Amino acid sequence: MAHAQLAIKPIDANFSLKDKIYDSLKQAITSMNIYAEDAELRLDERRLSEKLEISRTPVREALARLEQEGLVHIIPRRGVYIVRKTKAEMLEVVTVWAALESTAARLVIEKATDDEISSLRTMFITFEGGKAKAHIDEYSETNIEFHQSILRLSQCNLLCDLADNLFIHMRSIRDRTIAEQDRADRSIIDHLHIIEALEKRDADLAAKLVREHSMNLALHIEKHADYLE
Amino acid sequence: MAHAQLAIKPIDANFSLKDKIYDSLKQAITSMNIYAEDAELRLDERRLSEKLEISRTPVREALARLEQEGLVHIIPRRGVYIVRKTKAEMLEVVTVWAALESTAARLVIEKATDDEISSLRTMFITFEGGKAKAHIDEYSETNIEFHQSILRLSQCNLLCDLADNLFIHMRSIRDRTIAEQDRADRSIIDHLHIIEALEKRDADLAAKLVREHSMNLALHIEKHADYLE
DNA sequence: GCCTGGTGTATTGTATGCCAAGAAATGTGA
DNA sequence: TCACATTTCTTGGCATACAATACACCAGGC
């Protein structure tokens, strides 16, 4: 039903072009395939500002933030380039990711309710019994959701934020890391074991399983990710 | 002996005001006592640019980076403020720190030589036998050095960088966390145990000891850091 | 033909000016 | 005197102008 008064929205006064551009660029960068051979890694301030129909200043401030975050690299007087992680750097990302999620698992055991933990189970019902083969795409999403759920349930914002940043890089190569079917099946089994450890409130075991699960990804990258230089 | 060729250094062309200001401000912020009641948390773009004798633009870009890093908070049209962590946030910092250093310990065992590990011992010779009481100031430095050494020996840049950022916040309250003497003595004992675990190449034990050592700091903050709001 | 140096253009770095939003100060009426 | 409106001042947001550099291209000399 319509109100009799003019429906003025509270308006998000936190709208600043700088922030919008930051979000927009971040979104654009994370959703493009950085590792394609023909990927355009150069970012042109002027073209960006023209395309967004604003001046260069807020664009530059957004780029400064992205550089601090490690998504782009600014070479003075040369230009702005989207960062491609080397294989070694990607392995570091996964290693730190493992550290963060493993600690998150410990916190989940401290802080999450039984219900919250068991909610993790429900997201895998579709895939139980090795049906992952038929639904690899969906599974890829569920997989991500699972890991993010653990971080969320840890109720540690810093952990979530840092992990999200790392995840950007992992996401950009996920298509090539889950493609193999036995890896998907294996992954589901790992996840179920992790959930069991959480349900038993066995912090050491859960932390260990989470860490090993992530480090398996590291091993996989080490062996097969030749596209990372 | 002098070379026959002209020794031209590549010249650090990475001089950009933006970066210098960033370093300068970061240095200034980390070395001030943020948690003093009379601390001036407000940063004024114009005053800064006048004091540095440059324009506001590079200052703003430096501030944008500092915001992304979490050291300052920019409120649109209101001002720039140095961030004071709440107690809860500081606990998160320590928790994540524990996660990172614990993983670093594992990596040290994988990657460091026996010599590198035993080098950790030498920095504590001065304090052995409970002499920490007399040298608390020096010990505080050594303490920091120890933790940073572990990170360095892990040979994981990402781990080091992230930990350094967290350390900025921990450093700002360290005077009040090590002040008690039994904490200093206890700390040395912990460190020696950690070194022993590293020498035995017992990854699980080392990781556990490092984590617990850091989490003790969390407990201490939880109980005694009332100055954090 | 290749190297050297100069020139022009594209692009980034920095300075500056104007504008709008908040905050503080001031004025005004009950 | 107090509440509220108005003005003024402060301060950050954004646009734009100018300066400096990198790179491509070209011409001339060896």
Image (cartoon, coloured by chain):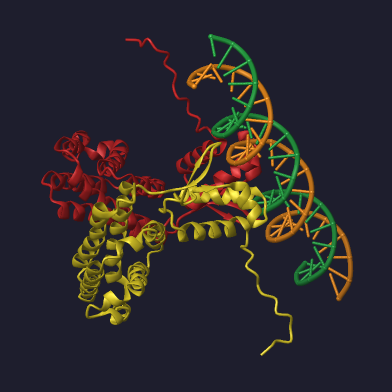
Chain colours: A yellow, B red, C orange, D green
Q: Measuring 66% from the left and 42% from the top, which residue is drawn there?
A: B46
Q: Is residue C15 above or below residue B42?
A: above
Residue A150 left/right relative to A73: left
Q: Position of residue B121 (x, y in %)?
A: 18, 37
Q: Position of residue A152 (x, y in %)?
A: 37, 69
Question: Residue A121 appears in which quarter of the rendering?
Answer: bottom left
Q: Is residue D17 above or below residue A187?
A: above
Q: Measuring 64% from the left and 55% from the top, which residue is drawn there?
A: A51
Q: Position of residue A60 (x, y in %)?
A: 59, 47
Q: Measuring 64% from the left and 52% from the top, which residue is drawn there?
A: A49
Q: Nearer the viewer, residue A19 or B60?
A: A19
Question: Residue A9 appears in which quarter of the rendering?
Answer: bottom right
Residue A148 left/right relative to A22: left
Q: Nearer the viewer, residue A41 or B190?
A: A41
- Judged from this view, the residue extending furthest toward the left is B200
Q: Position of residue B21 (x, y in %)?
A: 54, 38
The answer to whether residue B36 is seen in the rendering is: no
User: How many discs mark residues in the rendered view?
Assistant: 0
Q: Quadrant of the N terminus of chain B?
A: top left
Q: Nearer the viewer, residue A8 or A127?
A: A127
Residue A2 left/right relative to A104: right
The answer to whether residue A69 is seen in the rendering is: yes
